[in-house]
Amino acid sequence: MRDRLITYKSYAARTENDVKYAFNFLIELVGDIPVNHVTGEQIREFRDALLAYPVKGRTADVRRLTIRQVIKQKWEHTLSPVTVRKLIGFMNQGFELAVSEGWTVSNPVAGIKVPTRTPSSIRTERTEFRPGHLTILFSSPLFTGCKSASRVREPGSVQVRDHRFWLPWLGLFTGARLGELVQLETTNVKCDSGVWFIEITTVLDQRDLQQEKHVKTEGSRRVIPLHARVIELGFPDHVEKRGSGWVFPNDGGPDHLAREYSKRFGAYLDDIGLVDRALVFHSFRHNFKTACRMANIPAEIHDELTGHAPQNVGGIYGERKRLMTYLNELVDRIQYEGLPR
């Protein structure tokens, strides 16, 4: 059922991994039994096991234990109800397909509820970088000069200009999601009438890359002018030097890069003293939305720039097309207090 569901739904790579995790977890818990033998009681056990499963501390010794042995222990932090709800949602999709295909007569996941939170679940609201945070981050060795490409936490004279340098700048001044930025091809960085911009799209221009591109919603396909600060730092020159292919190449492809970079960015924040679980790469998106409001950019425009659906009927007309020069003028209004020159 799992493989048929993945084929049927054509999930993005990251989502496919989550689907596999959910089904593998259920199989380990109740066994690889026929679809029509799975009961509502087993799905409730699956839900409760997920809610009791640890987020951290899964050492090699712990991984050798069965799920039931693991969840008997007391863990400080366990999977959030939001994550559990998502995994059960995949299970529900699987059983809906099973009913549709005649593999079973009922869906044991139907009606299963997940609590809003548990005593051990981690619930952290993402927050934006405050001015002091931006000062610390963009004054740190990675952005001002480090010891070497492998020792970016130590001050030095080496100027790193790979994804570790560019992604935070782009996140701050475009509001784009990490997953959108890592799948930029060199052909997605363009200049029109003297205006540089990036194009967020699912179209793969260079077929030899052999990797699908995806966006969160239909409205996420968009263009975003590059802020003068990003151009001043030399991003168009960086892309030109790349020539072709991904702007940020990685052996595992964009999805792999997004997962790995997200972890390393968090570790880098810890290393420079920004130890706050609410600060993540996605925080730049919050910064951008706030900066748009502070720059008096119309709400429908910054919704368009960040790939959100129009909030009013008027925002739908004209397929949300704008003159690039107009958008560029608006984006260049954006300023951040605390950002070093």
Image: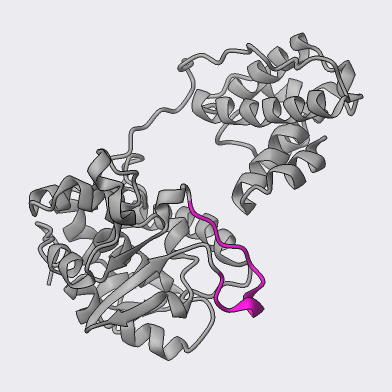
In percent of width and height, residue 316 lies at 31, 47
In percent of width and height, residue 339 lies at 14, 62
Q: Is residue 121 magenta?
A: no
In the depicted view, which residue is nearer to us: 158 or 196?
196
Figure label count: 0
Colour treatment of the image:
one colour
Q: Is residue 214 magenta?
A: yes
Quadrant including the N terminus: top right
Name the residue at 35% across, 70% down: 198
Residue bounds of the magenta highlight:
204-215
Q: Quadrant of residue 205?
A: bottom right
Residue 273 visible in the current orientation: no
Q: Is residue 34 above or below residue 10?
A: above
Name the residue at 46% across, 76% down: 247
| Residue 134 placement, left or right of 97 | left
| Residue 252 placement, left or right of 257 | right
Quadrant including the C terminus: bottom left
Name the residue at 76% across, 9% down: 41
| Residue 13 placement, left or right of 336 | right
Residue 198 visible in the current orientation: yes
* Residue sitting at the far right: 34
In the depicted view, which residue is nearer to us: 25 or 171?
171
In percent of width and height, residue 337 lies at 9, 57
In percent of width and height, residue 305 lies at 28, 56
Name the residue at 37% across, 84% down: 238
Q: Is residue 132 above or below residue 156?
A: above
| Residue 119 placement, left or right of 68 | left
* Residue sitting at the far front: 317
Q: Is residue 75 above or below residue 40?
A: below
In the depicted view, which residue is nearer to us: 11 or 250?
11
> Which is the main secondary structure of the residues drawn in magenta?
loop
